[in-house]
Image (cartoon, rainbow, N blue to C red):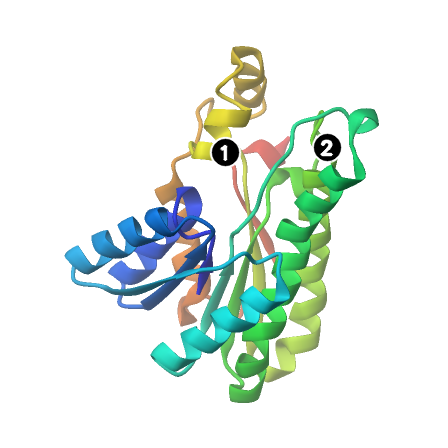
Amino acid sequence: MITGGGTGLGEAIAKAMAKVGAYVVICGRRQEALDKVVKEIHGSGGKALAIRADVSKRKDVDALASESFKAFGKVDILVNNAGINLVKPFLQLEETDWDAVMNTNLKGCFYCCQAFGKGMVERKYGSVINMVSVFGLRGFLNISPYIASKGAIVQLTKGLAVEWGRYNVRVNAIAPSYIVTEMAQRDIESDERIRQFNLSKIPMRRAGQPDEVAGLAVFLGTDASAFITGETIGVDGGWLAW
């Protein structure tokens, strides 16, 4: 189950998971984007299902879980990838701005962990992968709600790893830096000064590609990582090494 699976990192992870044999369910708010990804997975011989859902709404997540279980019987891997960002100075934020980011990024993760984690705990098997960001571990200008939401998910990852470890359910997080996605094109590449500042933080001096994140997601979703839980792993070109 990959939330936000219609574009960017979610799309790359969905295709990578399907390539190694996983049956994939993707959700998002844009049905057209979801259908395109599913069509491409089917064209490559994989199996996938698209379900339109807004993870900030409990009823949507409950329906998403119900449809996923009906289609495939169980969900062994959950990738909490759906997320939004808002670029605005802190003192200019409205309460609605804060709530929009928190409801999608943090509350959406909470809803999905409950809806899909229950079955994992009962079966004593599963892997939860939370997509965070280097900004969940470092500060940055004008994205305070995003930073706060991702930092909270880093800690939620640790809490669930401790709570669910006895049930053989692993919970880890992936922290990308500047990856070439639609969000990056809007929030980073639209301003050359911001793009250069981001690149200056990356020792490898380049942006990452979605496929370079997807590989780690596949690893964390399989038994190749069977003794790894509670970790936040950077895919950041060295950003967190500073």
Q: Can you say which quadrant of the picture contains the C terminus?
A: top right
> What residue lies at 46% left-to-right and 62% top-to-bottom?
220
Q: Quadrant of residue 47?
A: bottom left
Q: Which residue occupies the foreground of this view, 232 or 210?
A: 210
Q: Residue furthest right?
A: 91
The disc placed on residue 94 is none
Q: Quadrant of residue 51?
A: bottom left
Q: Which residue occupies the foreground of this view, 85 or 177?
A: 85
Dot in front, 2 or 1: 1
Locate residue 35 relative to residue 142 in the image: left or right: left
Q: Can you say which quadrant of the picture contains the N terminus?
A: bottom left
Q: Residue furthest top?
A: 193
Which amino acid type is shown beneath numbered disc 1?
Answer: Met
> What residue lies at 72% left-to-right and 57% top-to-bottom?
155
**What residue does disc 2 label?**
139
- The vertical placement of 172 against 198, above or below, is below
The x and y percentages for residue 168 are 56, 80
The x and y percentages for residue 103 are 68, 52
Q: Which residue occupies the foreground of this view, 114 or 21?
A: 114
Q: CA distance from mark 2 to mark 1?
A: 18 Å
Question: Is residue 180 visible to the viewer in this orientation of the structure?
Answer: yes
Q: For the residue carrying disc 2, how many other residues have a C-alpha within 10 Å: few (<14), some (14-19), or many (20+)?
A: few
Q: For the residue carrying disc 1, how many other residues have a C-alpha within 10 Å: few (<14), some (14-19), or many (20+)?
A: some
**What residue does disc 1 label?**
183
Secondary structure type for disc 1? helix
Q: Quadrant of residue 234?
A: top right
The x and y percentages for residue 81 are 51, 52
Which amino acid type is shown beneath numbered disc 2?
Answer: Gly
Secondary structure type for disc 2? loop
Task: Indicate which disc, 2 or 1, sits on the residue closer to the N terminus.
Answer: 2
> What residue lies at 53% left-to-right and 51% top-to-bottom?
82
